[in-house]
Amino acid sequence: MNKAIQWLTDPDRKYSDGLRMYAEVFGTDKQYDFFAGATDPGIGSLHFNLLEEKIRKAARLLPSAEESVPEVKISKRPEKADTSRSNPDKIRIVDNPLVDVTALPEELQQLYFDNKKLTLDIATEHASMKQAATDQERAVHLANAKRIEKQRAENWQAIDLWWKQNKPEAGQKLVTESVDSKRKETLRKAIHRAEQEIASGTLDDKKIKAREEKLAAWKKELEDLKK
């Protein structure tokens, strides 16, 4: 079991640990800035859910990943009939591989994660249909399943429509992000080094002033790149 899977299955997992793991696997790219901009969000929050998505992918890239990555359960469901369709624990929730969820606006990101829960809800309704004692009970669960399926389809439609209209050109995006990512990493190192030099107390007033001027310029450039 690799450390990504260990993090995913740890009920007390920390956002900061997942963020460090992301940087190890994917580097400090544009999405890293998105995650690093959050102030220690808790499990179940939007940023935490998005980070879990990325760490599940990282688990396949890290060494000793013989085991499959477990799905993170959004809600607990009672044991139902042992079929892949009716048992929520056996439902495989498939994400849209063409959509980068971190690039979506916040309201569509929420719909993205709502759909995972809706998929589990649909499976529960199908399981209840199989165990219903009367046709009337089965009809109720069938109606519930259809209503939830309609909501899920509407969510995907909204996500797909936005993505088709707003997704960046793949080639241009990769080149721009690569250049920006390298520059941001250079700036971070320069800022860190300058701050350490100032804090060391070994510089005279003239050198301190020069470092502070450079720091201000570097921080502004880094902030502009993040935007």
Image: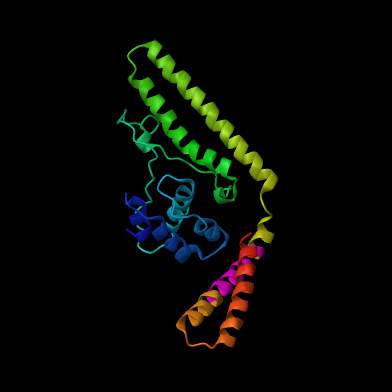
Instruction: List x then y, in percent, for residue 63.
Output: 38, 64
Q: Is residue 192 left or right of residue 179?
A: left
Query: Looking at the image, can residue 6 be seen?
Result: yes
Residue 5: quarter of image: bottom left
Farthest residue in the left direction?
Answer: 79
Quadrant in the rendering for residue 64: bottom left
Q: Is residue 188 magenta?
A: yes
Magenta region: 176-189
Camera-side residue of 226 and 178:
226
Residue drawn 52% across and 60% down?
A: 32
Answer left or right for 133 relative to 226.
left
The N terminus lies in quadrant: bottom left
Can you give x and y, in whole percent of width and height, for residue 38 in the image? 50, 55
- Residue 179 visible in the snapshot: no
User: In the image, residue 72 lies at what x, y percent?
Assistant: 39, 45
Picture layout, residue 155 above or below residue 173: above
- The quarter of the picture where the C terminus appears is bottom right
